[in-house]
Image (cartoon, coloured by chain):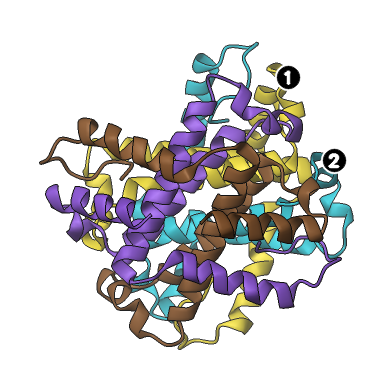
Chain colours: A brown, B purple, C yellow, D cyan
Amino acid sequence: MATLQRRLAEFAAARNWQPFHTPKNLASALSVEASELMEIFQWLTPEESARVMDDPGRAPRVADEVADVLAYLLQLCGVLGIDPLAALDAKIDRNELRFPVGKEPGADV
Amino acid sequence: MATLQRRLAEFAAARNWQPFHTPKNLASALSVEASELMEIFQWLTPEESARVMDDPGRAPRVADEVADVLAYLLQLCGVLGIDPLAALDAKIDRNELRFPVGKEPGADV
Amino acid sequence: MATLQRRLAEFAAARNWQPFHTPKNLASALSVEASELMEIFQWLTPEESARVMDDPGRAPRVADEVADVLAYLLQLCGVLGIDPLAALDAKIDRNELRFPVGKEPGADV
Amino acid sequence: MATLQRRLAEFAAARNWQPFHTPKNLASALSVEASELMEIFQWLTPEESARVMDDPGRAPRVADEVADVLAYLLQLCGVLGIDPLAALDAKIDRNELRFPVGKEPGADV
C-alpha cells in the first residue's frame, strides 16, 4: 500500500497535477469514482449484483472502479497525512463498542 | 490490510449482517460514506481545505470518514473476491500509458 | 417553482451565503443531499423500498431530503442561469430518439 | 412540471422500465447523476466554476446533467407520491426558523 501511495504521488508530480490535488478536490473525485462504481449495480437486483463478477462485461469495470476509489482515497490520505489502515483499525475498535452483537446495520460498518 | 478485511468480515458475521451486504448495497454504502467525507470540505475554500487537519473539530471527522470509506471498500472487495491493491497496481500501469506526462487531470487518477 | 427559486435566493442573500454558493460548491452540496436521500434506502430490499412512505419514521425524512436536493438544484440553476424545466424537456426529446421503445434502462432517464 | 412528470412516466411505461424503477434504484440513479454533474466542476477553481456557462464545451453538459438529476428526482417523487414543490416550501419554512439570519451555511439550504 505504501508502494502504491508513492507511485500515485510520483504519477501526479510528473504531470504537475499537485495544484489540482487539494483535499477538497480529491474528496470530490473520490465521491465521483464511488458513484461510478455504484452505477454498475444501479439497475441490478440484489441477486444479479451477487453474480456481477461472473459477467465478463462487468467484472473488469468493477475492478477498474475499485482501483479508482482506492487511488483517490490513498492520494487524499497522502496530502492530509492520514494513515488509512490505522484509522480503520481505530474505527473498528469503536464500532465494537457502538454496535453490540444483535443490532441491525447502521450507517457505518 | 488482510487483517482488517478479516476483522470486518467477522464483525459483520457476528451481527448477522451478511444478508444486507450484497455488492449492490455495499457499493451504495461506500458512495454514501464518500459523500460524508466530501461534505466536510463542502463550503471550504481550496486553501481552507488544505489546512483541515489543523482544525481540531474537523480532523477526527476526516479520519473517521476515511475509515468508513475504506471499510466499505474492503467489504465490497471481500464479497466480490477482488484484490484492491492488485487492481490499483494494474490501473496505474494502464494510466501511465493513457496519460502521458504533460496532460491535465482527467476523470481518474 | 420560480417562487421557490426566489425564496431560496432571498434566504441565501439575507444570510450572506452567496460567496459560498459557487457552482462548484452547490454541485457538491447537491450530490451530498442526493446521497443522504439514497442512504434512507441503503439497507432496504427493493420491496421494502417500495413501501417506504408507509413507514412513519422514514416518510418525513424522504420528503425532507427530496426538498434538500431540489433546493440545491434550483440554487445551482439560479447561479448558472439554467432553466431546469426547459433543460429536462429538451432532454426527454433527445432520449425519445436515443432509447427507442424496447431497450433496457440506460444511464439516464 | 406536472407535464414533465407525466412525460417521464409514459416514457418509462412505453419501455417497460417500471420494474427497474423501485424507489431504491431511482434514489441511486439520482445520486449517480448528481455526481456526474459535480464531476464537471471537479478540477475547476471556484472562479472557473463561476464561468462554466461561458465554456461552449461544458455548458451543454451542465444543462444535460441538470436535466438528468431533475428527471430522476421527478420519477422518484412520482413513485413515492411526494409533491417536491410542497416539500421544498415546507422545508424553507422550517429553515427560516432553524437558520436565523447571521449564521454560516449548514448542511442544508
Let me know if residue B38 appears in the view. Answer: yes
Question: Image height check: is C108 above or below D47?
Answer: below
In the rendered structure, the answer to whether residue D51 lies left or right of residue C109 reads: right
- At mark 1, the secondary structure is loop
Q: Amino acid at mark 2?
A: Glu
The Cα atoms of the two marked residues, 2 and 1, are separated by 18 Å
Question: Image height check: is C65 above or below A49?
Answer: above
Q: Residue at (72%, 29%) from the top-left corner?
A: C20
Q: Which mark is residue D47?
A: 2
Cβ–Cβ under 8 Å for marks 2 and 1: no
The chain to which mark 2 is attached is D
Question: Image height check: is B38 above or below D55?
Answer: above
Q: Residue at (52%, 58%) from the top-left corner?
A: A70
Let me know if residue D34 appears in the view. Answer: no
Label 2 vs label 1, nearer the camera:
2
Comparing B68 with B42, the one in front is B68
In the rendered structure, the answer to whether residue D89 lies left or right of residue A27 reads: left
Look at the image and tell me in which quarter the C terminus of chain A lies: top left
Q: Residue at (27%, 46%) from the top-left corner?
A: C53
- At mark 2, the secondary structure is helix
The chain to which mark 1 is attached is C
Residue position for label 1:
C16
